[in-house]
Each structure stands twice: as structure tokens, then as C-alpha cells.
């Protein structure tokens, strides 16, 4: 849905078509995106139109990047510890082998 809205505003009905979801389910997803301030929903006549807020996507992206860095660093540290433990295990096996 966000991918579709990244190409421009779309009606709620227009967002329903590409997905195998009911209008009710799409409306529920849109409500979550509106509450999260990722999407703005406006009325145009009888139609509801959704527009993506690019600045919100940037905020989410920045947040995800910081967590990605955190987890990459954590896994690098874990890998170093595991490698050290393997070396010590090999040394111990040679001593007692």
C-alpha cells in the first residue's frame, strides 16, 4: 500500500483493487497508517483519497537505519565472541587430546 502511495495519491477504492483484501480490511490498514501519521486521508466529493507523507517515511527510514546499525554491530560482536570461543575450544582439545 505504501509502495502504491509512493507513486501518488489514490482513492481508497483504488487501493483495494491490487490487493486480495476487502474494502473493510483496506480501510482498517489505512486507519492505522493515518494514526501513525504516515498517510493523510481527505475527502474529494464522495471519494476518500489517501496521500503519503514523505517526511513520515523519512523518519521511519532513519529509525530503521539506526536499528540496523545497532543489530549489525551486535552481531559483529557476537561473531567475534563465538570465534574466540572456538579458538579456545581448539586449544583446550589440543591440550587434553
Image (cartoon, rainbow, N blue to C red):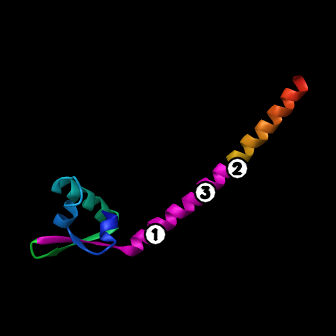
Q: Are marks 2 and 3 in contact (CB under 8 Å)?
A: no
Which residue position is annotated with label 1?
Answer: 59
Residue 44 in which image quadrant: bottom left
Location of residue 49 by image quarter: bottom left
In this view, 77 is above or below 45: above
How much space separates mark 2 and mark 3, taking CA atoms?
11 Å
Q: Which residue is mark 3?
A: 70
Q: Which secondary structure, mark 2?
A: helix
Front one among 50 and 92: 92
Task: Using the rendered view, name the quadrant where residue 46 is placed.
Answer: bottom left
Real-space Cα separation, disc 1 to disc 3, in angstroms? 17 Å
Could you tell me residue 94's position as x and y percent? 88, 28
Q: Is residue 37 visible?
A: no
Compared to residue 43, the image places residue 65 above or below, namely above
> Left or right: 17 with respect to 89?
left
Q: Position of residue 74 (x, y in %)?
A: 64, 51
Earlier-in-chain disc, 1 versus 2: 1
Question: Which mark is drawn over residue 15?
Answer: none
Mark 1 surroundings: few (<14), some (14-19) or many (≥20) residues within 10 A: few
The mark closer to the camera, 1 or 2, is 2
The image shows residue 34, relative to residue 55, as above or below, that is above
Q: Which label's residue is closer to the chain start, 1 or 3?
A: 1
The kind of secondary structure element at disc 1 is: helix
Q: Residue at x 32, y 73 (%)?
A: 7
Q: CA distance from mark 1 to mark 2?
A: 27 Å
Residue stretch in magenta: 47-76
Image coords of residue 86 (percent x, y): 77, 37
- Does residue 90 lie above or below 13 as drawn? above
Label of residue 77 in the image? 2
Amino acid at each position: 500500500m505504501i509502495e502504491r502511495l509512493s507513486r501518488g495519491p489514490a482513492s481508497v477504492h483504488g487501493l483495494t483493487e491490487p490487493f486480495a483484501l476487502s474494502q473493510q480490511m483496506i480501510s482498517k490498514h489505512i486507519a492505522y497508517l493515518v494514526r501513525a501519521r504516515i498517510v493523510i486521508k481527505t475527502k474529494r466529493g464522495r471519494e476518500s483519497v489517501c496521500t503519503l507523507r514523505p517526511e513520515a517515511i523519512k523518519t521511519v527510514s532513519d529509525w530503521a537505519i539506526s536499528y540496523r546499525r545497532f543489530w549489525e554491530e551486535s552481531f559483529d560482536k557476537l561473531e567475534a565472541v563465538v570465534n574466540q570461543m572456538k579458538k579456545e575450544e581448539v586449544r583446550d582439545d589440543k591440550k587434553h587430546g
